[in-house]
């Protein structure tokens, strides 16, 4: 029988165990849509009722992972840009796309956050997510603006495009078993499910070039 966490440190450790279990299950089962609280608690070695002491719902647990994903992306992007100056728009776009692709769980969660996660938690939890994700977003925009030749407004548009494209393309590139079978039977339909990172970078580079060429805000 799993023992109840009695100290703040033990409680924090249990919460981390649940988050790690959710990460592993998402990777093993083909995405966060297949992650259930029952499976998470079992993988973490806890009683099914215990999860409510750490996360009020499945949505709250997954939103925590999304929030951490923003900070991981900010950190990876900062490392990628370290010491750079004068990056061209295509080079800036390549950094955005490649660093996003390095975070598969975050790419998956970008679909689910606006679709269900942030709207299905309490208002205080939703406020915390918005606050922290926008802190990371602002830092990302500042880093891309400082190290490249695009304006702040153009970078904001580029990041907005990156988030939308990632959310869509990731799901296409990781089809359900039914769709994978369909694509095997109808290869002409499978083109959208191929080369996630290459396609994302290519589309973002085209977007960045257009924005910097007069198609985006200059401020």
Image (cartoon, helix red, strand yellow):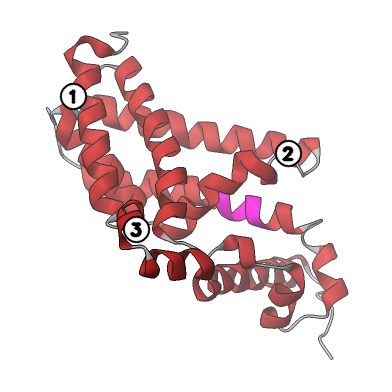
- Sooner in the amino-acid sequence: mark 3 or mark 2: 2
For image coordinates 17% across by 22% down, the residue present is: 149
Whether the residues at callouts 1 and 2 have beta carbons within 8 Å, the answer is no
Which of marks 3 and 1 precedes in the sequence?
3
Residue designated by label 3: 190
Q: Residues within 10 Å of mark 1 (few under 14, many from 20)?
A: many
Mark pair 1, 3: CA separation: 28 Å
Badge number at residue 209:
1
Residue 156 locus on image (x, y percent): 38, 23
Q: Which residue is mark 2?
A: 119
Left or right side of 118 for 164: left
Corner quadrant of residue 148? top left
Q: Residue at x 29, y 40 (%)?
A: 96
Residue beneath the point at 73% across and 73% down: 10
Residue at 87%, 73% (x, y): give it. 49
What crowding class fits label 2: few (fewer than 14 Cα within 10 Å), some (14-19), or many (20 or more)? Answer: few
């Amino acid at each position: 029988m799993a023992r109840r966490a009695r100290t703040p440190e033990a409680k924090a450790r249990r919460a981390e165990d649940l988050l790690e279990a959710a990460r592993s299950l998402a990777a093993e089962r083909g995405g966060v849509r297949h992650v259930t609280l029952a499976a998470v608690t079992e993988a973490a070695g806890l009683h099914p009722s215990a999860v409510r002491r750490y996360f009020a719902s499945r949505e709250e647990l997954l939103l925590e992972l999304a929030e951490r994903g923003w900070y991981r992306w900010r950190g990876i992007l900062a490392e990628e840009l370290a010491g750079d100056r004068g990056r061209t728009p295509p080079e800036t776009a390549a950094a955005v796309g490649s660093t996003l692709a390095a975070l598969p769980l975050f790419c998956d969660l970008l679909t689910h956050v606006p679709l269900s996660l942030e709207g299905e938690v309490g208002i205080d939890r939703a406020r915390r997510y918005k606050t922290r994700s926008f802190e990371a977003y602002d830092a990302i925009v500042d880093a891309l603006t400082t190290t490249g030749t695009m304006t702040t407004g153009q970078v904001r548009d580029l990041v907005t495009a990156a988030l939308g494209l990632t959310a869509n393309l990731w799901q296409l590139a990781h089809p359900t078993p039914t769709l994978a079978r369909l694509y095997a039977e109808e290869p002409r339909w499978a083109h959208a499910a191929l080369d996630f990172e290459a396609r994302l970078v290519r589309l973002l580079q085209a977007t960045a070039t257009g924005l910097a060429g007069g198609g985006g805000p200059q401020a």
